Image: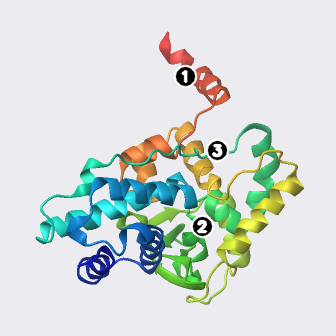
């Protein structure tokens, strides 16, 4: 059995319930590994083969894709061991490729002063920056998910592009399915644009169009170092932490299954934030 044959079997038997977007990602990574590993007999694959394949992935697609390829490869080979096709997992002898993650940025200072009116006047941006939704969650939100009376958004799905087609799928994880409180500024926008059409999407554009709109909005606002669209979500989390929000509550509100991910990745404190917060609490130290 070749690695290509095993991987196809692995997806068929053990990964039947993965989301379409994840399946597309697996296929892309397998395509990057296949030129070196695909035709090899499964039992003949050794650590040198794997290292060579991962270096080729990094050269072609970058260090992050090499990391993802390593994780997928190691998992598929671990399943082959458990299924009795291999005695040991050769990927265990290979180090995970190094990748320096580019940290998210929370909008603050002059940039926040310039962009807050933009965010507060655009429903799509407000869903990310004032409710912490992911891009796909904001685009997948239906009017039937908007409960103005209770003041919550029922996040239940995401809009993603798979094989060049836009489809709706479940949230990124089970924790992503949540009810998010609606901030006052966001509530004003939603009330002004509310439509009694439960199955109609609140934001009628594609992920690419929304990202382009955000780039243009920043240029028009005079922001010199543009933020990613996802940084709106970082900003939401960071501002709530600085306001004293309980991290466990924040974990729920932004849809994380891991408390550590919430604490370490989605909250950013600058020196100016530290000074402001210290002044607020300094009296309690004496």
Instruction: Write the residue at 55% across / 78% down.
Output: 159
Instruction: Work out which residue is located at the far top of the displayed protein and give it.
Output: 286
Please state which of residues 92 and 203 is positioned toward the viewer in this rendering. Answer: 92
Residue 45 coordinates in the image, percent (x, y): 27, 63
Residue highlighted by disc 1: 281
Real-space Cα separation, disc 2 to disc 1, in angstroms: 35 Å
Circle 2 sits on which residue?
Answer: 135
In this rendering, the label closer to the viewer, 3 or 1 = 3
Q: Which residue bears the numbered disc 3? A: 106
Q: Toward which corner of the image does residue 109 lie, by quadrant? A: top right
Q: Residue at x 67, y 27 (%)?
A: 272
Whether residues under marks 2 and 3 lie with C-beta atoms below 8 angstroms apart, the answer is no
Which of pointers 2 and 1 lies earlier in the amino acid sequence?
Answer: 2
Task: Note whether 104 is above or below 39 in the view shown.
Answer: above
Mark 2 or mark 1, whichever is nearer to me: 2
Of 4 and 243, the residue lying toward us: 4
Name the residue at 58% across, 49% down: 234
266 vs 130: above or below: above
- Left or right, 13 with respect to 149, comes to left
Which of the 4 image quarters holds residue 176?
bottom left
Q: Is residue 252 visible?
A: no
Instruction: Give the side of residue 8 with respect to residue 186, left or right.
Output: left
Image quadrant in which the N terminus is located: bottom left
First reached walking from the N terminus: tag 3 or tag 1:
3
In-image side of 5 versus 198 (left or right): left
Q: Position of residue 141 (x, y in %)?
A: 56, 77
Task: Tell me if mark 2 has few (under 14), some (14-19) or many (20+) residues whose alpha carbon lies within 10 angstroms of its own.
Answer: many
- Can residue 159 be seen in the rendering of this structure? yes
Disc assigned to residue 113: none
Residue 117 pos. (x, y %): 80, 55
Give me the residue at 26% from left, 48% from top.
93
């Amino acid at each position: 059995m070749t690695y290509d044959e095993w991987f196809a079997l692995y997806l068929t038997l053990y990964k039947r319930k993965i989301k379409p977007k994840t399946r597309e990602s697996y296929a892309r990574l397998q395509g990057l590994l296949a030129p070196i590993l695909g035709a090899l007999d499964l039992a003949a694959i050794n650590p040198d083969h794997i290292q060579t394949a991962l270096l080729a992935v990094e050269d072609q697609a970058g260090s992050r894709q090499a990391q993802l390829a390593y994780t997928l490869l190691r998992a598929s080979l671990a399943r082959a061991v458990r299924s009795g096709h291999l005695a040991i997992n050769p990927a265990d002898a290979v180090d995970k490729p190094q990748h320096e993650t580019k940290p998210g940025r929370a909008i603050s200072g002059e940039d926040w002063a310039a962009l807050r009116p933009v965010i507060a006047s655009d429903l799509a941006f407000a869903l990310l920056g004032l409710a912490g939704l992911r891009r796909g969650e904001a685009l997948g939100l239906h009017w039937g998910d908007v409960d103005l009376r209770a003041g919550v958004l029922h996040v239940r799905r995401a809009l993603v592009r798979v094989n060049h087609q836009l489809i709706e799928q479940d949230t990124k994880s089970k924790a992503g399915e949540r009810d998010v409180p609606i901030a006052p500024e966001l509530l004003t926008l939603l009330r002004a644009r509310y439509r009694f059409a439960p199955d109609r999407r609140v934001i009628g554009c594609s992920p690419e169009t929304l990202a382009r709109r955000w780039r243009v909005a920043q240029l028009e606002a005079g922001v010199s170092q543009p933020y990613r669209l996802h940084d709106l979500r970082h900003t939401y989390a960071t501002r709530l932490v600085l306001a004293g929000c309980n991290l466990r509550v924040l974990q729920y509100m932004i849809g994380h299954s891991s408390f550590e991910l919430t604490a370490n990745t989605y909250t950013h404190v600058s020196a100016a934030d530290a000074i402001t917060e210290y002044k607020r609490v300094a009296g309690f130290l004496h």
